[in-house]
Amino acid sequence: QVQLVESGGGLVQPGGSLRLSCAASGSIVSFNGMGWYRQVPGKERERVATIISGGSTYYADSVQGRFTISKDNGKNTMYVQMNSLKPEDTAVYYCHAFQVTGSAVRTYWGQGTQVTVSS
């Protein structure tokens, strides 16, 4: 069972930057894709960014141009660089990964890391 552990969250002023990391306990090469989600109390979890094994990326409209997702297979770690942060980016950010085997999809989640954007 692969475990995902996020780090890098914290308090930052509007316009600032943070880089979140997601470290996997095993090889991330086996994942078909990885991504970041976020959630605020009372709202559904929202997909923020995804990176597929081939390197293709997806971004939510709300973060396009400000966030950059990447991964380092050698370090078994995924990142998201978040720039020009806004108060509405405040949320718990979760790391996500999935594996497709035939018709089955297996998903993994981290425990979450809090990001607060406030002056």
Image (spheres, grey):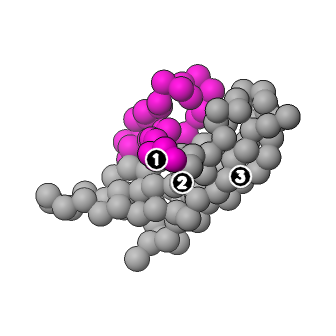
**Is 96 situated above or below 52?**
below
Q: Which residue is rendered at x = 50% and y = 38% of the image?
A: 48
| Distance from Cα at disc 2 to Cα at disc 1 | 9 Å
Q: Which residue is mark 3?
A: 9
Q: Is residue 33 left or right of residue 83?
A: left
Q: Position of residue 67 (x, y in %)?
A: 60, 32
| Distance from Cα at disc 1 to Cα at disc 3 | 17 Å
Residue 65 inside the magenta-drawn segment:
yes
| Distance from Cα at disc 3 to Cα at disc 2 | 11 Å
Amino acid type, callout 3: Gly
Q: Which residue is rendered at x = 49% and y = 71% of the image?
A: 3
Of all residues, the one furthest to the bottom in this rendering is: 1
Is residue 74 in view from this perspective? Answer: no
Q: Which residue is rendered at x = 33% and y = 52% of the image?
A: 32
Q: Which residue is mark 2?
A: 94
**Do the residues under discs 2 and 1 have CB atoms within 8 angstroms?**
yes
Amino acid type, callout 2: Tyr
Q: Quadrant of the N terminus?
A: bottom left
Instruction: Report the span colored magenta.
Output: 42-70
The 10 Å Cα crowd at callout 2, few under 14, some 14 to 19, many 20 or more, is many
Q: Which residue is mark 1?
A: 45
Amino acid type, callout 1: Arg
Quadrant location of residue 104?
Answer: bottom left
**Do the residues under discs 3 and 2 have CB atoms within 8 angstroms?**
no
